[in-house]
Amino acid sequence: MSAANFRDQDPLSSPPFYPDARLPVVFCGALTAAALRTAVSRPAAVTVLLSTAFVAAAAAVTLSLLTARGARFCLPLAALALGLAAGILLAGNAAQQSIDPAQLTAGHAVEGHLIEDASRYADSSTSYRLKVMRVIGSTGVVESGGVLLVSVPGGAELSAGRRLRVSYTPDHIRTTGSSVILYSRAIDELGWTAAHYAYRDLARQALFARIEAMGYRPGGLFRALVTGSRSRLTREQQRLFRESGSSHLLALSGMHLGIIAAVSFLVAKRVLGRRAAFMATLAACIIYIYLVGMRPSLLRALAMLALAGSVRLSGRRSDAVNSFALAISTLILLMPSLVHQLSFQLSALSIVGILGPGVRIRALLAPFLPRRVAMGLAAAAGAQLVTAPLALAVFGTVYPVALMSSLVLIPLVSLFVWSGLLWLALTLAVGQVPAALLLLPRQAWLIQSAARLFAGVPSAVPSVTTSVVTITVVALVVGVLYYRDGLLLLRRRPGTWPP
């Protein structure tokens, strides 16, 4: 098959014919599955498993060098073995352990530092995620470790890196599942763990002060959408986004980073060359993530952007599935604790849905709908399809209306963020600019009104019937979308992947 024919072929009808076309996917799946499992308590058993996996990988690679047909079968086995070995090795350190409640009951105060920015809402308490360093009791100070959630009514919106002392009594301690929550009103600030955290906090406060000039309604929404700070959002606004199935728009993700990257690239490209503009865009994205916090969804999007952009600039075709698999593998290898965070799991599963079932659904809708509508609906349906079982298990509710609300709210939110960034640029260039000049208050009202409209649609209530129906529908839809691939796999067509 010639290169031209390969470029023109339909990816749905002809699987990639290279023997290593999906090796990153095999490695990523094995790595994730193994890292999610609890490490074996006996070191000898871990050693045996690791040795077996590495030997199998080495043998598979050796056999793959003999013939092309051997490569077709052995290279995936090597990727599988290496992924399992790396996952087993990381599993022991993957989960961030909560502090032992027994240590807290023996003390009256804890000292530590915030590992992420505080989560605060306009009409509720503030939550702090504290890395505990020591527990202070009547008998002295005990060095400790682990993560503790601290809830303070009306607490300040503190930034990551802040050192705190939290006073409490034993009746303030609550345990929910694997998490330990401490309810307190007495918090003392002890400084910063490093100087750069203080400079980061100054930059964040300056940005927040500038956004305040936008007005309460548009400023609070823009602050949440761009910085992740929801301190100006009320519970009612949160409820509207949640019940309209669009709460993911408030969680910083690839869509938000994509807008920052697009703005940075368009500006840098006018001054620099294409390659230099790409490097400047990566730098801008890194600075943005540093300011708003290293959220799993943003790290995943940054890794995919860096990988895909580097491949394209090198003159090669980028593959979204392989870029995604390599990005997820890199993040898990560097930060094993991500694999146990719900936000990372939902972010990864949503991309799986968009790149997997979403592509098939788009092909089915393309003959009947405009291109952009088909793409938006297919992406929303694919993400909803794959994340529904996990969302149902964790939150107990699914919102089918998200399929329609995404078509309306995503364009509105994107336009609002673009307009807000333009407003920020104008205020930096010429000083104070009325937010009404760019219709920001009107856009914020329109977004909230659309969310209220879709929030009125009944959602699926948590029940055994709902769970069974949801899982059954997901299984049936996936089966319908991929039945042809199953037939090809059973027929074992020569020269295709998977074998």
Image (tube, rainbow, N blue to C red):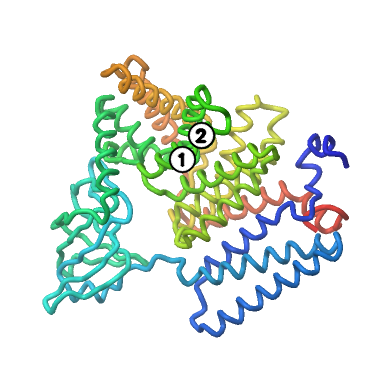
Q: Position of residue 92 (x, y in %)?
A: 47, 72
Picture residue at 40% right of the left edge, 49% below the top: 294
Picture residue at 19% right of the left edge, 51% below the top: 153
Left or right: residue 310 versus residue 17 is left
For the C terminus, the quadrant is: bottom right
Alpha-carbon neighbours of circle 2 within 10 Å: few (<14), some, or many (≥20)?
many
- Please determine whether, in this image, residue 221 is positioned above or below residue 186: above
**Residue on which disc 1 sits:** 245
Q: CA distance from mark 2 to mark 1?
A: 8 Å
Q: Position of residue 406 (x, y in %)?
A: 51, 34
Picture residue at 62% right of the left edge, 37% below the top: 378
Left or right: residue 32 versus residue 52 is left
Q: Are marks 2 and 1 in contact (CB under 8 Å)?
A: yes
Callout 1 amino acid: Gly
Task: Between residue 440 and residue 290, name the one nearer to us.
Answer: 290
Q: Earlier in the sequence, mark 2 or mark 1?
A: 1
Disc number placed over residue 230 in the picture, else none: none
The image quadrant that residue 436 belongs to is top left
Left or right: residue 333 versus residue 484 is left
Q: Position of residue 230 (x, y in %)?
A: 31, 40
Callout 2 amino acid: Ser
- Please determine whether, in this image, residue 393 is positioned above or below residue 58: above
Which structural element holds mark 1? Answer: loop
Q: Position of residue 90 (x, y in %)?
A: 51, 68
For the N terminus, the quadrant is: top right
- Please determine whether, in this image, residue 306 is positioned above or below residue 19: above
Task: Between residue 484 and residue 9, name the one nearer to us.
Answer: 9
Task: Between residue 128 and residue 488, name the one nearer to us.
Answer: 128
How many discs appear? 2
- Please determine whether, in this image, residue 199 is positioned above or below residue 428: below
**Residue on which disc 2 sits:** 406
Which structural element holds mark 2? Answer: helix
